[in-house]
């Protein structure tokens, strides 16, 4: 059986599964996930009588994924500005005792 951490009561198995989930989530933030994970079913749908709906769905899905990927890639923290803001907040706390939103 999986060993249980006596401090937290959680098994290593649960932590491993959580890590896999986090890695998959992060991976699919930057790569387009498939609509169907079963390619045979996708091909079957594209040849059937609902072909037009399937193509429209794929197009919309691709657009949404492109926007999502661009948004995730564009999200960057300006480290210099973040440090400056942190120093400013620390100085305010040291001088006034409270932090106010700018």
Image (tube, helix red, strand yellow):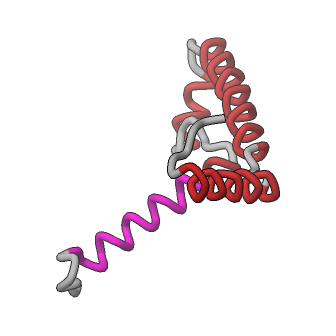
- Depth order, front residue of 44/1: 1
| Numbered circles on residues, count | 0
Relative placement, left or right, of 87 versus 9 is right
Quarter of the figure with residue 27: bottom right
Relative placement, left or right, of 78 versus 26 is right
Q: Residue furthest front?
A: 95
Quadrant (top left/top right/bottom left/bottom right) for the N terminus: bottom left
Q: Position of residue 25 (x, y in %)?
A: 53, 52
Q: Position of residue 81 (x, y in %)?
A: 79, 51
In the displayed structure, would residue 50 be above or below residue 7?
A: above
Q: Where is residue 30 in the image (x, y as percent from the top left)?
A: 70, 49
- Depth order, front residue of 46/32: 32
- Depth order, front residue of 100/5: 100
Residue displayed at 38% across by 64% down: 18
Residue displayed at 57% across by 39% down: 100
Relative placement, left or right, of 6 versus 74 is left
Residue 1 seen anywhere in this rendered image of the structure: no
Whether residue 15 appears in magenta in the rendering, the answer is yes
Quadrant (top left/top right/bottom left/bottom right) for the C terminus: top right
Residue displayed at 61% across by 33% down: 43
Whether residue 44 appears in magenta in the rendering, the answer is no
Quarter of the figure with residue 52: top right
Residue 24 seen anywhere in this rendered image of the structure: yes
Residue displayed at 22% across by 74% down: 10
Residue extent of the magenta highlight: 10-26
Q: Identify the main secondary structure in magenta.
A: helix
Quarter of the figure with residue 101: top right
- Depth order, front residue of 86/38: 86
In the displayed structure, would residue 60 be above or below residue 29?
A: above
């Amino acid at each position: 059986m999986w060993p249980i951490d006596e401090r937290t009561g959680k098994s290593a198995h649960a932590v491993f599964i959580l890590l896999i989930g986090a890695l998959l989530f992060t991976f699919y933030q930057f790569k387009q996930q498939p609509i169907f994970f079963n390619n045979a079913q996708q091909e079957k749908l594209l040849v059937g009588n609902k072909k037009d709906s399937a193509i429209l769905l794929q197009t919309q899905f691709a657009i949404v994924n492109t926007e999502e990927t661009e948004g995730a890639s564009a999200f960057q923290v300006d480290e210099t500005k973040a440090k400056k803001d942190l120093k400013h907040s620390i100085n305010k706390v040291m001088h006034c005792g409270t932090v106010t939103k700018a």
